[in-house]
Amino acid sequence: MSEAAVVSFADEPISKAKRRLADLPDRVVEGDPHHQTEMHFESPDGKLIAGTWTSTPGKWHAFTERDEFCVILAGHVRLVDEAGNAQTFKTGDAFMIPNGFRGYWEVLEITTKHFVIRDHAAS
């Protein structure tokens, strides 16, 4: 068993991925957002991940069954719950999206964030 080590986001990521969100059926509400993710950490069970994410503008249904902590490094986003309550976050802001949130992510300008996600989806 390897020894646990502190993970620096300045180090080379363990993986990189790009995707067009429209490739996920029924997810996009507006625009054509493209995502780039650099993964810096994944727990052995895959339930906890951390990395850096960049998105082009667009609006989509938020993913559910997860807790997500975010720090906006650059850009401007809005999270809107199902009741229409909106919260806006910009460069330097940090926030937590709790498991059970239902609503939308809206990227208003190209945004980059650091994230930590705990997945609650059934295995």
Image (cartoon, rainbow, N blue to C red):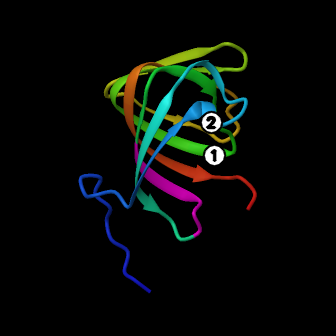
Q: Which residue is depicted at the point 59% across and 60% down?
A: 47
Rendered-image quadrant of the C terminus: bottom right
The residue at the point 51 percent across, 40 percent down is 19
Q: Look at label 1 and name its amino acid.
A: Arg
Residue, far bottom: 1
Q: Residue at x 58, y 15 (%)?
A: 86
> Magenta region: which residues?
45-52
| Viewer-proximal residue among 10 and 5 | 10
Secondary element at tag 1:
strand
Residue lying farthest to the left in this orientation: 10
Dot 2: within a 10 Å radius of its alpha carbon, few (fewer than 14), some, or many (20 or more) residues?
Answer: few
The mark nearer the N terminus, 2 or 1, is 2
Q: Which labelled disc corresponds to residue 10?
A: none
Q: Residue 48 magenta-drawn?
A: yes
Given this view, does label 2 or label 1 mark the residue nearer the observer? 2
| Residue wearing tag 2 | 23
Above or below for 106 versus 36: above
C-alpha distance separating marks 2 and 1? 21 Å
Q: Sort mark 1 into few (<14), some (14-19) or many (20+) by Cα contacts within 10 Å.
A: some
Residue 12 lies in the magenta stretch: no
Q: Which residue is mark 1?
A: 66
Residue 16: horizontal and vertical position, in percent? 40, 52
In the displayed structure, does residue 1 sit left or right of residue 104?
Answer: left
